[in-house]
Amino acid sequence: MTDSLQSFNWKDSDYERPGNDWVCGHKCELGQVCRLGPDSQGCCQIQSRCQPEKKGEKYVCTRAAVHGGKCKEGPTEDGNCCQSDARCQPKRSLAAKRRLLSCIATAAGVLFCLFLFGGSSSTPRLAPGDVTSAHAAIEAECQACHTSAEGGLGHWMHAAFDSGAGLKDSARCLRCHKELGTNAMFAHGLSIDQLKEKTAQLHETSQPVETPFSLQLAAFIDPPDTDKTLTCATCHQEHHGREASLTQLTDTQCQSCHSSQFASFEHGHPGLGDYPYKRRSRIYFDHSTHLKRYFVEDEFKRTMPAGIKPESCRSCHTADSSGQLMLTGSFDEMCASCHEPQIKDIDFPGVPFWALPVISDSNDSKSVQWPRKTGVFSFARLPHLMELLLKDDPDYQQAIQNLGELDFRRIQESEEAQASMVNAIKKLFYEIAIDGEDALQRRLGKSGSVYLNLEPSIVPTLRQAQQIWFPDLIAEWEQKSTTQNQESLSPPEMQFMHQRKSPDISGGWSLSNSDYTIRYRPLGHADPLIKAWLDQAVQEDPQFLTQDYLWQIFSNPTASGVEGTTGALASGRCLMCHTVDRDTQSGLAFINWKPFQPTSKAAKLTRFSHAPHLALGGRQRCESCHTLDSTGSDITSVLRSQFFTRDKAGISWEIVDDPQQVCTSGFRPVNRMSCATCHNQKTQIQSCLQCHQYHVHGSGKRQP
Amino acid sequence: MIQQLIQYRIRVISFLVLVTLTLSVFWLYSLTLSKTAFASGILLLCCILFLAAYQWRKKLSFLSLGTATVWLQFHIFVGLMSSLLFLMHIGFRVPDGMLEFALFLTYCFVFLSGVLGWLLSRIIPYRLLSRGEQVIYERIPIYYRKVREAVEQLVSENLKTDEENAVADFYQKNLREFFSGPRNQLRHILHSRRHRHQLTQQVSQILPYLEEREQEAMKQIAVQIQLKDDLDYQRSLQSVLKTWLFVHVPLTWTLILFALFHTITVCAFASTSG
């Protein structure tokens, strides 16, 4: 058994100070105990040698007692100390070495930070990672996205404590992403009012479901606030690499702000409502009758395009270039073979644009030169075009004033009205005979009429009517106005027109001597004059629209106003197929002449692409989702209830142009559960972003 | 002993509960599309500053700030928690940016060196108790000298004529180097005793050839060999306990510097990045 090496006797044991910077060199290397140790500067405090002092002839030792006192030998004769130098080279303690290393590490860190902050390489050194490939072009320009990048460290500090910095940076995103609109900073890019409106609509149509527990807890931790602005970085976080997704969100995250929350598309997702038939279709097409009758029964086969009956939906509907939408074929391709003859309808006499009222001879005056003195005038008012042309004529105004409560069917009861009306109409005929189109321009232009420049022009027919009905009009009128000296018109087409006294079966303007009218019958589908007329008429105030005689006719089941005559609701009339909508912003009504175009940019939160659904090896057919509604009733009554309603007086039909009106396209709304057969937990293709886009003005890729 | 075990279990369970709670709160927080990176970053910075404060607590021992033992327990607890926050903060992936990667590496070194130190401080003290006398590290060179002088004394006492100096020759040939300073550090760290066994064997082999007095001296030298070897063992293991701090402490300062710089840049720029 050996003695203990360590002694804690105060005499034998030094007090160790490992925290000191320096340690005795001899102690470290040789194990020699040093009672003094080095000083704080790392110098050995042992002074074995002294500086001998000369006292008289001799040198004397001057070593202090603390260093061992005066030595026996004493200094040499030449005054040098006799002791050898016993000083050590102190060494750094472990603690000092650690401190030194800490200083070196910190200095290296500072240098590294300065290196990062300095320089102007193409890829900023401070960037926390690569941006996505979409933004790679502006990666070197930090200030393109960051307001902080416009200044130095001071600017950074300011930005760090600026609560609005996020919104300022987001505003920079919108410099390029203009498609997101003015409300891009609000949830879904909708204004607060729009969002509330949509939420209310959803609450009306959806059944309440149980909120998942996780979302209940999340709302407890951080209640959602949909009224505040959101920064882009809330969802889109950059600098995570070239291939990183900027729209990587979970379904639960998507729902965190929603007032109606559910487990998944399969379980709890609100029904699809009337999707995709939310709006009235632009073209009304009775799928039920066509699919169940016309496309099935052989008697209609001969009228089909090329005599071939459509075999499937894709005979008429083809996907657009993106595969998203199923577009409808044109009228000429799909409908003309059956419906063109109905549009031309040779039995239809045409719409009266001009009509001469019955003027009887007065009792106390000479006979009036007027072609129509007998018979019954069947219209309460003059045709709308005549009214427009005569509107500013003093004689016409006088006649209307004289008529008072009477209408044109009983004009014979007022001689003053008759006389004024005769003058007004003759004057109009005369002006048109002399000036033609200019006369029309002059009269219509006064009121800034929208009915100018309708083609084909009525002027040649009016001149022909003047020649037939008022052959002496020009001479008679020149006698009346001696100041005028006009040559009579003898248009080159006169001879030809003299012979046209019966309706022209090829369509266009026709002159009738039986009821003294000038009528227009459509030349065929998309007749330019009728189309232009209706386009103008539909924009008028609905209050005045009902007074538009042409409108009345075209929106009247009895086109000419006489029961039994077919009108707009007869197959082949414009408004039989073309619906009317009202622009929510301008308030103006317009006719949907064309089917849905893929260029239409409606603000939508839902997206759907037909292509992937039709590319499932024929397994997925249109009928899988679009099922016919067998509750369809008589087409005319359906149409009437949907598009037309009687006015208060019960005389004319008014258009129903409520865009919110449910469209009875003949299909039942798509059922959510039919989607869930494929989009479910098992297939893992039921994420929110599969069918929804966050921004109403989506800029992302279209997905199925 | 049982009480210690119960306390240990309570600590582990508390830690696991806290980890679960933290993960749950952050997951729920992420559902609301809030910036969890900011929350975890702020907490992480606070943790790092608290962990660094342990060093200051040791320096300011005159202040009544709780015992060093309690501080150490919290240091370990918060250190482990910080690793969880760190992983959540970086999104369980290696960052791409230069500063972020440097910060990532620094944290990893500091954390791993801390874990290593924690393990060493749990293992080495038991090993130190198992061999030799518990000596103050700074005094070990003095004890080396003591042992060497004792051995040299034994050798000089057994000096004879020039022809017969077996002990002195043996010392010169086999033991001088061994007694001249610290030896076999790596072997001691690896808990190897081969060198000791070899020296003992060499002593055993020479004993039959020595005179009785020399044998007695050689036996005493053998005791000194064991004493020296135990000192080497103590020195080696204590060195390990002190050396890991050479990584942990300096890098802590670098970590704090990087973290502060990262905080400034993030607060200034993070409105468009996650």
Image (cartoon, grey):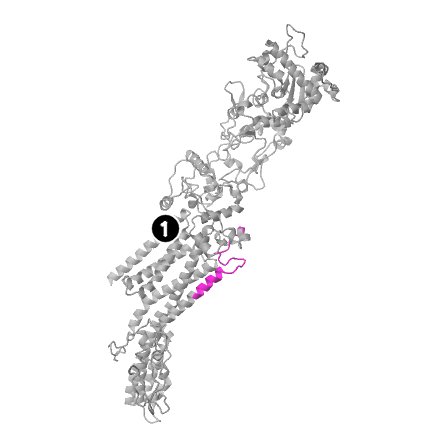
Q: Quadrant of residue A157?
A: bottom left
Count of numbered marks: 1
Q: Is residue B92 above or below residue A96?
A: above
Q: Is residue A569 magenta?
A: no
Residue B38 visible in the displayed image: yes
Q: Disc 1 designates what residue?
A: B24
Pinpoint residue A208: horizontal percent, then vertical percent: 39, 36
Disc 1 residue type?
Ser
Can residue A358 be seen here? no
- Near-viewer residue (A152 or B172): A152
Is residue A128 highlighted in magenta?
yes
User: Secondary structure under badge 1?
Assistant: helix
Q: Return the residue found at the far top.
A: A364
Where is residue A428 drawn, in percent x and y? 66, 18
Give the quadrant of residue A419.
top right
**Residue A461 as seen in the image, left or right of residue B154:** right
Image quadrant where one finds the N terminus of chain A = bottom left
Vertical placement of residue A307 versus A427, above or below: below
The chain ID associated with circle 1 is: B
Relative height, residue B44 to residue A64 (above, below): above
Report the residue at 44% width, 63% height from top. Answer: A110
Residue A209: where, in percent of width, then height? 39, 38
- Which span is picked out in magenta? A107-134
Residue A436 x, y percent position in the rendering: 69, 23
Q: Residue at x 49, y 27 (%)?
A: A631
- Left or right of A237 on screen, residue B8: left
Judge left or right: residue A611 versus residue A505.
left
- Viewer-proximal residue among B268 and B93: B268
Q: Could you tell me which residue is drawn at 51 percent across and 30 percent down? A: A659
